[in-house]
Image: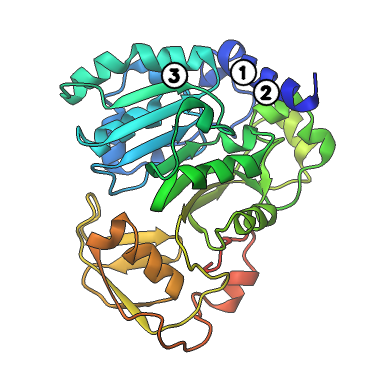
């Protein structure tokens, strides 16, 4: 049995048999606070069956707005918490697929489908759970260009083949589709002995991605610009483990990336302007594309070519008016002061960060 198979088997046993609830976690890396939740999401969460919540593990809130009518794929869905929230947000005309490799987690999700649909007032289920591996979505029938939004909550770090995961994500996304996920990142590469520690790997630390390696990986698969929507430094919460991993700085980040042609690896200025209509549900006054792009309702805002594409060639297009094209180039676009880009304690990443 190779190391990759051993890690996978350990993770399946850890989340399927060892952990009986969040109280059994050895660190705080896979726990997220309700403080980060949008009120609408918190309200839906209050409608979820208790078992779904107590046996769910995550490090963020990877549920983007404007999901009505969308087809959503939740990678590493666990007990289905985020998948059920998304099923409420997409409505009866949308659909959600949840994928997980752990039998015990999938079993919890499946036995709550009927009760959750009743609570949501749906005539038929709009969520389906499939057992499988996030590195091979084709094996479980997820077709090319079939998904509007892919989301994931602190699961990609558990994979031993992250490039394959992201390649699969961009295969299944529709043109203009979005990847929106929360995960653990680092400010330096995790030493090999920590990577190979089964407990640290299962606790979302050993497999955490160095942020610059993530940037390079995304560029290699054809996505030169991703955006950070939220971030915070992780408090390990376990003195013994902190001593072992203390040379590495860990961060929880929520990242968004779009399947778009023509994105550039730095922000370029074409004189384009975007105006937010105030129509994204739950965001009547402003909309945050990322951690440094806040669009105020009705206020024209100069944007780089990449941002113009993210707003004008995706499901957000109906919520914005984007004027201008790429016929005239005015040089690099200064998205943020240089000191904010280079002197921040952790890189925001992507071209426009």
Q: CA distance from mark 3 to mark 1?
A: 18 Å
Q: Secondary structure at mark 1?
A: helix
Drawn side of residue 298 relative to residue 222, left or right: left
Q: Visible in this render: residue 183?
A: no
State the image coordinates of residue 20 (x, y, percent, origin top left): 53, 12
- Colouring style: rainbow
State the image coordinates of residue 47 (x, y, percent, origin top left): 26, 24
Residue 183 sits in quarter:
top right
The residue at the point 54 percent across, 19 percent down is 23
Q: Secondary structure at mark 3?
A: helix
Q: Give the crowd class for mark 3: few <14, some 14-19, many >=20 residues within 10 Å.
A: some
Front residue (pair 12, 219)? 219
N-terminal label among 3 and 1: 1
Q: Secondary structure at mark 2?
A: helix
N-terminal label among 3 and 2: 2
| Farthest residue, direction right | 193
Proximity of marks 3 and 1: CB atoms separated by less than 8 Å: no
Q: CA distance from mark 3 to mark 2?
A: 23 Å
Proximity of marks 2 and 1: CB atoms separated by less than 8 Å: yes
Front residue (pair 162, 344)? 162
Q: Give the crowd class for mark 2: few <14, some 14-19, many >=20 residues within 10 Å.
A: some
Drawn side of residue 273 relative to residue 261, left or right: left
Q: Give the crowd class for mark 1: few <14, some 14-19, many >=20 residues within 10 Å.
A: some
Q: Which residue is mark 2?
A: 8
Q: Which residue is mark 3?
A: 54
Q: Which residue is mark 1?
A: 12
State the image coordinates of residue 234 (x, y, percent, origin top left): 60, 42
Is label 3 or label 2 in front?
2
Residue 220 sits in quarter:
bottom right
Residue 218 drawn above or below residue 134: below
């Amino acid at each position: 049995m190779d190391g990759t198979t051993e890690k996978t088997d350990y993770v399946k046993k850890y989340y399927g048999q060892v952990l009986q609830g969040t109280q059994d976690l050895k660190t705080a890396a896979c726990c997220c606070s309700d403080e980060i939740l949008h009120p609408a999401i918190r309200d839906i969460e209050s409608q979820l069956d208790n078992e779904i919540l107590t046996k769910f593990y995550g490090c963020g809130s990877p549920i983007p707005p404007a999901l009505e009518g969308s087809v959503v794929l939740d990678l590493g869905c666990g007990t289905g918490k985020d998948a059920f929230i998304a099923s409420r947000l997409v409505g009866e005309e949308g659909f959600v697929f949840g994928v997980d490799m752990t039998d015990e987690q999938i079993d919890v999700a499946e036995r709550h489908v009927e009760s959750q649909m009743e609570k949501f007032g749906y005539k038929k289920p709009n969520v389906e759970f499939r057992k499988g591996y996030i590195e091979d979505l084709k094996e479980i029938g997820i077709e090319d260009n079939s998904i509007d939004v892919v989301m994931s909550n602190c699961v990609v770090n558990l994979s031993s083949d992250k490039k394959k995961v992201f390649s699969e994500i961009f295969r299944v996304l529709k043109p203009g589709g979005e990847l929106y996920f929360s995960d653990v990142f680092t400010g330096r590469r995790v030493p090999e002995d920590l990577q190979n520690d089964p407990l640290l790997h299962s606790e979302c630390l050993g497999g955490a991605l160095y942020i610059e390696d993530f940037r390079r990986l995304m560029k290699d698969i054809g996505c030169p610009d991703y955006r950070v929507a939220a971030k915070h430094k992780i408090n390990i919460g376990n003195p013994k483990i902190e001593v072992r991993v203390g040379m590495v700085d860990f961060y929880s980040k929520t990242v968004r990336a779009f399947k778009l042609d023509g994105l550039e690896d730095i922000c370029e200025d074409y004189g384009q302007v975007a105006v937010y209509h105030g129509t994204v549900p739950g965001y009547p006054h402003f909309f945050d594309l990322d951690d440094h792009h806040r669009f105020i309702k009705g206020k024209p805002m100069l944007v780089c070519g990449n941002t113009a594409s993210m707003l004008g060639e995706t499901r957000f297009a109906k919520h914005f008016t984007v004027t201008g094209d790429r016929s005239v180039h005015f040089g690099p676009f200064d998205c943020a002061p240089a000191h904010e880009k280079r002197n921040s304690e952790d890189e925001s990443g992507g071209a426009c960060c």
